[in-house]
Amino acid sequence: MSAGDPPSYYARHVFCCENKRPEGHPRGCCKDKDGTKLRNYLKARVKELGLEGVRVNSAGCLDRCELGPTMVIYPEGIWYHYRTLEDAEEILQSHIVGGERVDRLVLRPDDETPPEA
């Protein structure tokens, strides 16, 4: 943030890719890798836990299709690959609630394949 910028509206803003590419597209898509199911889970859990200042949104293509499903959490700008509800819950508890990274799921800018879970 720069001096004079307003404070963030949300403490954590989570964008979960739910993009759908045509069948057989070589890059794949997050929707076909349960992106919607995982986003719905996170959204429901945030509400269930009463986490104020946390918003979970659907995102169109985040352009990391081969690594999907993906999410990015702001204001930190940390990207994750997550496959299961357990991965989503770990990100929720560790990063969103606890402020700690889930290193095994973090995507780095030069990743070309998903991290090993």
Image: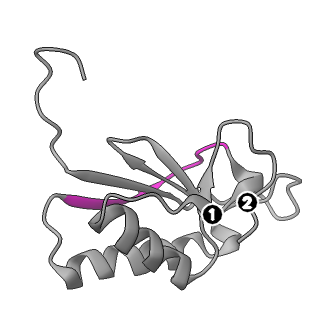
Quadrant housing the N terminus:
top left
Name the secondary structure under disc 2: loop
47 falls in the magenta region: no
Q: Nearer the viewer, residue 51 or 102?
A: 102
Q: Residues within 10 Å of mark 2 (few under 14, many from 20)?
A: some
Q: Quadrant of residue 24?
A: bottom right
Q: Residue at coordinates 72% horizontally, 52% vertically from top-left? A: 65
Name the spot of residue 110 as percent of width and height, x first.
73, 36
Quadrant housing the C terminus:
bottom right
In the image, taking residue 23 as reference, residue 7 lies left or right, namely left
Q: Which residue is mark 2?
A: 115
Question: What is the three-letter code of the residue carrying label 2?
Answer: Pro
Question: What is the three-letter code of the residue carrying label 1?
Answer: Arg
Q: Are marks 1 and 2 in contact (CB under 8 Å)?
A: yes
Q: Which residues are magenta?
A: 54-63
In the image, taking residue 53 as reference, residue 18 lies left or right, namely right
Q: Which residue is mark 1?
A: 104
In the image, taking residue 46 as reference, residue 57 lies left or right, namely right
Above or below residue 3? Residue 1 is below
Name the spot of residue 112 as percent of width and height, x first.
80, 46
Above or below residue 82? Residue 85 is below
Name the spot of residue 81 as percent of width and height, x first.
62, 61
Q: Nearer the viewer, residue 77 or 23?
A: 77
